[in-house]
Every structure is written in structure tokens, then in C-alpha cells.
Amino acid sequence: MNISNKPVYTSGVASSILGINNKTLINYENAKLISIKRNAKGRRLYSQQDLYNILLIRYLMKEKGLTMKGIKLAKKLVNAAKKKGADIFNLLVPPKIEQKLLKKVI
């Protein structure tokens, strides 16, 4: 499936699609778990990729019990392994869960 990186969703729309509070989105951004684009007026705009990343964060927190610090570390480990040719992402997020999350944003 192809996920767009084009920022088109406002905070209100993004929080509605994801079923989470707008404040949670801001907390994730402040914690540097996500990096959100802004329009000319300074309003946050989210892409499908951003929404997917947020769903991944929610999954890792609720289902795997990771904290924000734990998610940052997991992200670093996945990226480091990828640079060395190893794909360990599916150890954190099983393919069935990944597909389920993708369907929510596409």
C-alpha cells in the first residue's frame, strides 16, 4: 500500500480520524515522537504517513507497554538495524497489525 507524505489533514481532522484528543497529538510532537509540517499560517498539517506513525505510537504504548522514551529507543534500534540490512520492525509490530493500521489511514 502506498502512503502519502503530503500534509493535508488539520489537527481536528487528524484527531477525528485517529480517535484521539488533539492534545495527545501535540504531546507526541513536543516529545519529538513525530515531526509535523505547518502551513503558512503556522497551523499543523498531517499526512497519511503522520497518521500511520501516530497509530504505531499508540499501538506500541497500549499493546506493548512502551513509554515515549521506549518508543524513541525502539525507533533508533529499528533504523540502526535497517542500515545494517536487518529488518526488525516486524518484531515490534506483527504484519497483521501493520496492515490493520495502514487500512485506517488509507
Image (spheres, rainbow, N blue to C red):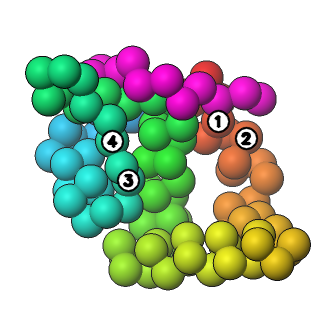
Tell me: residue 91, above or below residue 5: below
Q: Which residues are magenta?
A: 1-13
Residue in front for this viewpoint, 57 or 5: 5
Disc 1 is placed on an element classified as helix
Judged by its main secondary structure, the magenta piece is loop
Disc 2 is placed on an element classified as helix
Q: Position of residue 62 (x, y in %)?
A: 44, 64
Contact check, label 1 and label 2, Cβ < 8 Å: yes
The answer to which image quadrant residue 36 occupies is top left
Residue holding disc 2 = 99
CA distance for labels 3 and 2: 20 Å
Q: Position of residue 3 (x, y in %)?
A: 64, 29
CA distance for labels 3 and 4: 6 Å
The residue carrying pointer 2 sits among few (fewer than 14), some (14 to 19) or many (20 or more) residues within 10 Å by Cα, namely few
Between tags 1 and 3, which lies in front?
A: 3
Contact check, label 3 and label 4, Cβ < 8 Å: yes
**Residue at the image position 37 percent from the left and 31 percent from the top:** 46
Q: Position of residue 24 (x, y in %)?
A: 22, 50
Disc marking residue 36: 4
